[in-house]
């Protein structure tokens, strides 16, 4: 077995005990990038000299007996929309190709502090808006399982690089499924943490002249993607921290509540927006059976508040984005414009063409009620099991294939859009395959119950059959040309 095939946990342990060096690990991962990235285009800015220099510094720290972080020497990718000092901050937009970040954002700083070695910037759509990872300056990212299907978005490059073995960990962010959906599409694990657990602070120099809209501040989170639950848990704890510069940061990290009895799981299959594909229903049934086998008490239930939260996502986020649209449409590519056209049509069917300020204010008020009701339901000893999407991984560019298909894509993503509105933690974990594509399920817990959710994800992972993306693992090479 080559070093790139080891888990992040195994790599950290081996580096710490000097079984192998961080430099050897970096070299192995870089060779893997050279083998498969020309075909997949998951990482768009790889700087081997910088990665190897970081790895050599990690080895020097081991040799000198310095305290080592939990990810010491472990390679990780960062996303093109996330500031990392000295790295391009293109946002997948040609006009921003010359922008360089002057500071690390808080999640990148946390990874650096935990000892991670940075290996490449992961691809994403323009302004990280779509559930597909294609843009004009960097081109299309392919799903390691199937060229014809999306690797997800917006953290599609992050998930694809993991599935293909280029890095054992990846940083992503999520305001509408951008961590959880790519994880499901590529057969890896993705965590959307409780808002505030991982700081979402960015230096003012990297934010532009105006602060982010309220939904971006209150809903967007940073989080890890990994090949397995144990690695995701390690990365989550390494990234979590107190940071009161973040408007929603927490002053003290919460402790896990002791559990006296079996954990209850509510299986939510359908919230009345769109029926799930049979393969998605099968994945839910399998996951429920595995959780039952692990001692969880699973019961199917109806939870219409998730549908209401998904509808609020289309109101509050899109109204916050409306003043930004002219600039986004001017700088973004044609695919972004088409996607936004259909997304706003979907919202208009729910809220009208131009919702007024009263609807917006009432939407925020209703959100608070939904959060209270869901927290009362879940407490600290209940979880929800939902689809990741009502469909298996979409065909490439399904969201811009036409009005009917574009609207159906938004509808299918209700499990992705409802959760950011509420701010609760969610984990996407693989639950098998269907027709050669991975199928994931989502687990949701009460606020700050990440470890409880990850325990259930581990129970599913322990029992689920694991496939592998054969095309990527074959190491075939085919250039992916930039999108036009």
Image: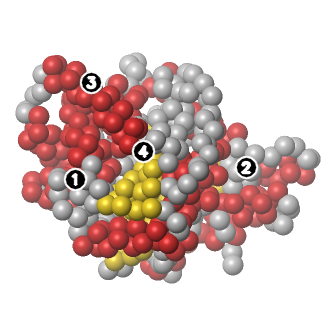
Q: Residue at x 65, y 65 (%)?
A: 7
**Residue 384 rendering spot, x and y as whole percentages:** 39, 53
Of residues 194 and 232, the one nearer the viewer is 194
Numbered disc in front, either 4 or 1: 4
Mark 4 → mark 1, Cα distance in angstroms: 17 Å
Can residue 449 be seen?
yes
For image coordinates 66% across by 60% down, the residue present is 8
Circle 2: element type: loop
Q: Report the disc number at residue 378.
A: 4
Tell whether label 2 touches label 3 (CB within 8 Å). Answer: no
Where in the figure is residue 269, as x and y percent of width and height? 28, 60
Alpha carbon separation for disc pair 1 and 3: 21 Å
Find disc 1 in the rendering and name its residue.
Answer: 271
Residues under labels 2 and 4: Cα distance? 31 Å
Report crowding for label 3: few under 14, some 14 to 19, many 20 or more residues within 10 A (C-alpha): few
Foreground mark, 3 or 2, reads: 3
Residue located beneath label 3 in the image? 365
């Amino acid at each position: 077995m080559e070093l790139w095939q080891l888990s992040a946990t195994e790599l950290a342990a081996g580096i710490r005990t000097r079984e192998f060096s961080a430099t050897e690990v970096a070299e192995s991962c870089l060779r893997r990038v050279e083998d498969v990235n020309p075909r997949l285009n998951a990482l768009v800015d790889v700087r081997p000299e910088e990665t190897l220099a970081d790895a050599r510094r990690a080895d020097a720290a081991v040799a000198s007996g310095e305290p080592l972080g939990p990810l010491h020497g472990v390679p990780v990718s960062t996303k093109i929309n996330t500031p990392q000092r000295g790295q391009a901050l293109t946002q997948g937009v040609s006009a921003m190709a010359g922008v360089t970040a002057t500071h690390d954002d808080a999640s990148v700083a946390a990874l650096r502090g935990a000892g991670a070695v940075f290996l490449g910037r992961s691809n994403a759509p323009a302004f990280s808006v779509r559930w597909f990872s294609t843009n004009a300056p960097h081109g299309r990212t392919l799903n390691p399982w199937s060229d014809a299907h999306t690797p997800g978005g917006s953290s599609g490059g992050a998930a694809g690089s993991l599935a293909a073995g280029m890095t054992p960990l990846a940083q992503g962010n999520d305001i509408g499924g951008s961590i959880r959906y790519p994880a499901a599409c590529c057969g890896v694990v993705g965590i959307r943490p409780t808002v505030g657990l991982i700081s979402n602070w960015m230096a003012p120099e990297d934010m532009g002249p105006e602060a982010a809209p309220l939904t971006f501040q209150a809903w967007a989170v940073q989080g890890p993607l990994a090949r397995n639950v144990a690695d995701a848990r390690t990365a989550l704890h390494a990234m979590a921290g107190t940071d009161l510069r973040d408007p929603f940061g927490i002053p003290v990290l919460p402790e896990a509540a002791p559990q006296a009895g079996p954990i209850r799981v509510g299986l939510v299959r359908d919230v009345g927006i769109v029926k799930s594909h049979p393969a998605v229903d099968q994945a839910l049934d399998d996951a429920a059976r595995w959780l039952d086998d692990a001692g969880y008490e699973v019961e199917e239930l109806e939870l219409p508040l998730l549908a209401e939260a998904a509808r609020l996502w289309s109101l509050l986020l899109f109204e916050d984005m409306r003043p930004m649209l002219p600039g986004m449409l001017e700088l973004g590519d044609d695919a972004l414009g088409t996607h936004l056209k259909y997304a706003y049509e979907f919202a208009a069917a729910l809220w009208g063409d131009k919702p007024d300020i009263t609807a917006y204010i009432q939407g925020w008020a209703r959100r608070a009620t939904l959060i209270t009701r869901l927290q009362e339901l879940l407490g600290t000893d209940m979880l929800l099991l939902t689809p990741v999407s009502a469909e298996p991984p979409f065909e490439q560019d399904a969201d811009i294939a036409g009005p009917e298909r574009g609207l159906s894509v938004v509808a299918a993503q209700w499990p992705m859009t409802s959760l950011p509105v509420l701010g609760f933690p969610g984990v996407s974990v693989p639950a098998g395959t269907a027709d050669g594509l991975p199928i994931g399920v989502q687990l949701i817990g009460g606020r700050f119950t990440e470890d409880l959710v990850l325990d259930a994800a581990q129970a599913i992972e322990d029992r689920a059959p694991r496939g592998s993306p054969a095309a990527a693992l074959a190491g075939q090479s085919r250039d992916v040309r930039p999108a036009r």
